Image (spheres, rainbow, N blue to C red):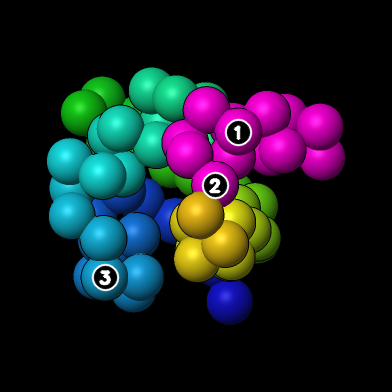
Amino acid sequence: MNKVISAVEIVKTYGLSYQTVNYYTNLGFLRIIESKGNKRLYGREEVEAALKKIRELKSRGYPLRLIRDELLKQG
């Protein structure tokens, strides 16, 4: 399996909108590891772990600000 995933692949794989991927990137939830022209690449395992944690915390009622704090604590 490829170790990187593009924003478009995140949209298709995880059912997020492209705007959500951009928003999560801007908030620091998803970290770009490489840019190739107009294409942003993310670490596949890091994205999977972050999205799992985001979904878990959202289901428990956490606001995005606290989710960001939790994700930053984890490194």
- CB under 8 Å between discs 1 and 3: no
Residue indicated by mark 2 = 62
Residue segment shown in magenta: 62-75
Residue 71 is one of the magenta-drawn residues: yes
Number of residues whose C-alpha sits closer than 10 Å to that of mark 1, classed few (under 14), some (14–19) or many (20 or more): few
Q: Secondary structure at mark 3?
A: loop
Precedes in sequence: disc 2 or disc 3:
3
Dominant secondary-structure state across the stretch colored magenta? helix
Number of residues whose C-alpha sits closer than 10 Å to that of mark 2, classed few (under 14), some (14–19) or many (20 or more): some
- CB under 8 Å between discs 2 and 1: yes
Amino acid under disc 1 = Leu
Q: Quadrant of the N terminus?
A: bottom right
Residue 30 in sight from this viewpoint: no
Residue indicated by mark 1 = 66
Q: Where residue 16 sits: x, y (%)? A: 26, 60
Instruction: Select label 1 or label 3 by which is in front.
Output: 1
Determine the image quadrant of residue 69.
Answer: top right
Q: Residue at x 21, y 28 (%)?
A: 38
Residue 38 is one of the magenta-drawn residues: no
Amino acid under disc 2 = Tyr
Residue indicated by mark 3 = 15
| Image vertical order of residue 49 relative to residue 14, above or below | above
Determine the image quadrant of residue 57.
Answer: bottom right
